[in-house]
């Protein structure tokens, strides 16, 4: 694939290969399925527009994930998001198979505890356990050193353990 331009076939390949993971990550950040769909779409629009800037220093997945996280952080900072009622009953009643999956995830005690962590700890737990990135990949995505990524993961696990649910996290590793 040429790094200067992106054709429709290449773009579709990226969506097919990474779309579900990016949607999941958007949902984990934003906690709203419809908003996650919008963020996922915005992520791939940015990938399409900025593909010529991809230097290949990291994998496509790492590069796209970094874009996704930035999009989600922008959504969380934006003023219009603060006015949205995330628990709209109309949205919860829609029958969408992926949404049902995400709703089940929300009911999980471990997931609820993870979502209460500080953002820097929450994101590393989500990327490591839910997205299955290596610590090295997480360090690249977050633009931090590997030792810093290991330290954050350790602190996040310790925080979860202090809340009495850390054993579940260690069992998954």
Image: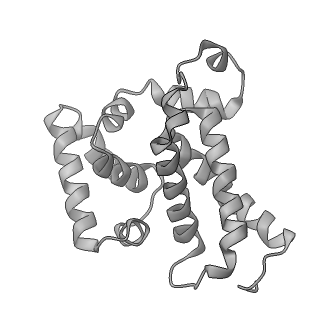
Residue 166 occupies quadrant: top left
Toward the left, the furthest residue is 162
Q: Residue at x 66, y 63 (%)?
A: 46
Toward the front, the furthest residue is 79
Q: So how many labels did they put on this image?
A: 0
Spot occupied by residue 77 in the image (x, y as percentages of width and height): 45, 44
Tell which of 62 and 46 is nearer to you: 46
Tell which of 59 and 6 is nearer to you: 6
Tell which of 34 and 169 is nearer to you: 34
Q: Is the image coloured rainbow, by chain, by secondary structure, or in one colour? A: one colour
101 lies above or below 91:
below
Please indicate whether residue 37 sits to the left or right of residue 150 in the image: right
Q: Residue at x 36, y 30 (%)?
A: 112
Spot occupied by residue 74 in the image (x, y as percentages of width and height): 50, 50
Residue 103 occupies quadrant: top right
153 lies above or below 118:
below
Residue 153 occupies quadrant: bottom left
6 lies above or below 11:
below
Please indicate whether residue 110 sits to the left or right of residue 4 in the image: left
Spot occupied by residue 40 in the image (x, y as percentages of width and height): 64, 50
157 lies above or below 10:
above
Spot occupied by residue 143 in the image (x, y as percentages of width and height): 37, 71
From the image, which quarter does the N terminus lie in? bottom right
Q: Residue at x 34, y 33 (%)?
A: 110
């Amino acid at each position: 694939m040429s790094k200067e331009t992106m054709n429709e076939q290449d773009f579709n390949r990226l969506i097919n290969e990474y779309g579900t993971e990016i949607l999941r990550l958007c949902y984990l950040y934003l906690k709203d399925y419809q908003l996650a769909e919008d963020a996922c779409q915005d992520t791939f629009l940015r990938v399409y527009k900025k593909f010529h800037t991809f230097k290949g220093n990291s994998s496509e997945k790492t590069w796209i994930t970094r874009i996704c996280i930035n999009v989600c952080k922008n959504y969380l900072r934006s003023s219009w998001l603060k006015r949205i009622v995330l628990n709209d009953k109309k949205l919860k009643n829609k029958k969408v198979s992926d949404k049902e999956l995400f709703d089940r995830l929300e009911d999980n005690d471990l997931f609820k505890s993870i979502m209460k962590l500080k953002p820097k700890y929450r994101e590393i737990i989500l990327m490591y356990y839910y997205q299955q990135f290596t610590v090295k990949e997480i360090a690249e995505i977050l633009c931090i050193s590997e030792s810093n990524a290991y330290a954050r993961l350790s602190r996040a696990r310790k925080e979860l353990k202090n809340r009495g649910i850390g054993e579940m996290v260690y069992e998954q590793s």
